[in-house]
Amino acid sequence: MTTFLAIIVLILVAIAVWQMTKIFELSQVNADNSQVANDKDNKLNGYLMFAFLVFLYILMIFSMWKWGSFLLGTPASAHGEDYDNLMAISFVLIFIVQFITQALLHYFAFKYRGEEGKKAMFLAHNNKLEVIWSIIPALTLAGLILYGLYNWVSITSIDEDEDPIVIELYAQQFNWKARYAGADNVLGDANVRLIDIAKANVLGIDESDPYAQDDKITTELHLPVGKKVLFKMRSQDVLHSAYMPHFRAQMNCVPGMITQFAFTPTVTTEEMRVDDGIVEKVNTINEIRAEKRAKGMDADPYEFDYLLLCNKICGQSHYNMQMRIVVETEEEYNAWLSEQKTFAASMGKEDTKTETTEAVAQVELVSDEEAKIIGVN
Amino acid sequence: MSGHAHHKETFITKYIFSQDHKMISKQFLITGLLMGVIGIGMSLLFRMQLAWPGESFKIFEVLLGKWAPEGVMDANIYLALVTIHGTIMVFFVLTQGLSGTFSNLLIPLQIGARDMASGFMNMLSYWMFFLSSIIMVSSLFIEAGPAAAGWTIYPPLSALAAAQPGSGLGMTLWLVSMAIFIASSLMGSLNYIVTVINLRTKGMTMTRLPLTIWALFITAVIGVVSFPVLLSAALLLIMDRSFGTSFFLSDIFIGGEVLHYQGGSPVLYEHLFWFLGHPEVYIVLLPALGITSEIIATNSRKPIFGYRAMILSILGIAFLSTIVWGHHMFVSGMNPFLGSVFTFTTLLIAIPSAVKAFNYITTIWKGNLQMNPAMLFSIGLVSTFITGGLTGIILGDSTLDINVHDTYFVVAHFHLVMGISSLYGMFAGIYHWYPKMFGRMLNKNLGYLHFWITAVAAYGVFFPMHFVGLAGVPRRYYDYTNFPLFDELQDTQVVITVFAIIAGFAQLIFLYNFFRSMFYGAPATQNPWKSNTLEWTTPVEHLHGNWPGAIPEVHRWAYDYSKLREDGEYIIPGQDFVPQTVPLIDGEEDSNH
């Protein structure tokens, strides 16, 4: 019933707008029917231009004050700090340029509003000015490009000597899985052609690959703090994107190829939960959720967790394709990982840990090949 | 050849299968406006879902039928609405609706030609556009729903019927519609290029062309260069979908079985798509900027500042626009080195864009601004172009793009810089050239009302949206309630939606004004805005062939507003403008440098 009323109201509003428009138009009994702006229009709209400038300034300041707290806050990865610095510098520049140019535009529109008989200045060009405002943006941008690319290179180049922990992120409509490489830190070969639902080999891991035996598949992503993690991403059906906003990290998962992204988590989940910004955010959220509960809606109290979200349109349940990320100390991480079942165990085989280490030497070539397929860098 | 031939015109040849550029221009405009109503209407529906997720609305039930059981919007139709909204607004409204309208109207009139180089091809271009519109709209009514893979229709989602309902017949219709659309666009563009190059009147050198023509001309060139690439992408996708090829697909397991595809790559599709997709931004934007250049100069009673710099920046933007597409793909899995290159070329585009913005501001400086509705929309365009353009510095930077890619930050950015800006340009053009099209004036007070409500509401929609994006909220999510983290944004979503509804309803004022003025508007005079360009030398009543006598000769550039003689008097005493047809007086130099 309320919705029906809402619709009626909407339709009535539409009719009212139409009718008011008509009345508004008819009420203008006016000798000047040329429909070309006269001094009165120029004056009114000139003042409105000035008012609009004030509106824009208020909007900008209000937004920063009111919605500034939406920002993600303390970055949880090593490169996150550089990322946030670059972002801050860019934003400062943007706001300076925005404040100045909008002021000039709207103030001039107000100041030079037309009057009958006033003469405009004939000014066709001025090479000096034009050179100045080509060069200033060029220099500013050169700085930004250099700083940006410096960061880009350091984020995307993956130094194998650092011996990062290798984890596969596996995407499918509409969930995520993580595959840990196990003691050998090498992921076993896998291809969607090897998927065998009957045997619960859902990631298509090559059962005969010795590297694969100690791999561990999980539905939650645990990361040890302070260790570089190299993610290898796969998708089995459509494009997905592994988006980990708190870590300033994102990479698409593409069927048919392996993509990668690496970062070092620097803040554990426990530490982040007591971070000032996050505490404030969580309090606000819990107030909102308490209100929802009071209205009888389903809203449990919220506790902060890192998240992995899908950020590439992937179908009906794209909006709910998420995985919890837990960053913890190395001991906690090891303890958690040791509880997870190996691939071999889940396939019903004996734990083949010892065999694996022996086999590693023989299949070194395979891993080279895999590196080639991975390609980038 | 004299254009006003003595053949008898029937209703059909005059209003339907017309080969007259002015009639074709009106056909493009009205089709574009109708598509715009559909496109904007869809956005209001999905904005309502975002503000009040899972809420039941009667209007959903009425408009979406089985896609809104008991008035609650279905997740699949949400994605379809988003997809078709994007497609319609980008292609049908802002490409053919904008370019098709104003290229057709202005190119012959402003360069001094009787008509387009090929009237027949021009007519064909419109009717193919019409056909593609019909197919696109009809896809809304099929059993499994319209295409729903986003307006970029990335495979494999768009390629596999098993991936989502919209990837069946709906996607086929989308592809067929777009293939026809591209043919229409190409025929139009080729015609515009040939007309500008060959049919300029005596004295109309390239450096005397109004900036509108420069913008429309270069837009057509970009279209001819990039649209065929989208056509090939669409054709290859059709092959993958229907004939089992593997251009974009490989190693796929879906619906419980492994598919045969091997060796293709979705990344290849992304490259092909954005090879058009990015220039498309400028195909949409340049005509709006050209229109604005003309309107700001005329209404400031001042020459456009830096005419040659404006031409150079159009050329610069056009060239750069074809080598920046990779900035849509920084996190697509392509080689990071390519990301570096595209960051470099992308940020370079800021330079000609900055030149344009500064030149507009300088044009207004010390002018005698006539606040006609067209002028207001032009100033509005400069404002949103700056606000939206500036955040491009963040998105064009591969590093910063990592965390804002595909979030609402992107949505806010491109809606301001190409959506709202181009719509403002289109509105400005309609208010300015309505007298030329229909021989009547639009009501100015309704125009003011339309502008001010839209201007406030548009910022009200898209300014807060930046912050939603910075909070890490992904786009194309049907519902955010599964993420308690985003709970605090719900109020902002409501604010955005309310402003969107206000903005949407404000367009009714325009529609009323537009259709009513056609019949009851104040009759137009020949040159209502006291403009210099050639279109205002034609009679108010439309003639086939435009000028009743000989085509006028051009003696000067288009921007001699408020130009003074040495004795401090206007060139034509008592009149602050000098039409292009007036010969240079003794000792006067053309100012087109």
Image: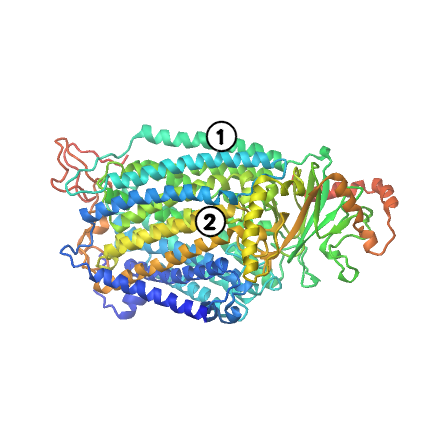
Q: Hey, which quadrant is residue A370 in on the image? A: top right
In the rendered view, does A19 fall on the left or right side of B95?
left
Q: Is residue B269 left or right of residue B198?
A: right
Label 2–label 1 contact, CB within 8 A: no
Q: Residues within 10 Å of mark 1 (few under 14, many from 20)?
A: few
Counting from the top left corner in percent of width and height, residue B121 is at 36, 59
Circle 2: is it few (<14), some (14-19), or many (20+) Cα within 10 Å?
many
Quadrant containing the C terminus of chain A is: top right
Instruction: Identify the disc placed on residue B360.
Output: none
B584 to A19, vertically: above or below? above
Q: Is residue A14 visible?
A: yes
What chain is tagged by disc 2?
B
Q: Secondary structure at mark 1?
A: helix
Q: Report the residue at 53% width, 31% height from top.
A: A147
Task: Answer yes or no: are tags 2 and 1 on the same subunit.
Answer: no
Residue to which mark 2 is pinned: B465
Considering the image in quadrants, where does the N terminus of chain A appear? bottom left
Please name whichever residue, A366 or B452, is drawn nearer the observer in this view of the structure: B452
Q: Where does label 1 land, which residue?
A: A143
Q: Amino acid at mark 1?
A: Gly
Q: Which structural element holds mark 2?
A: helix
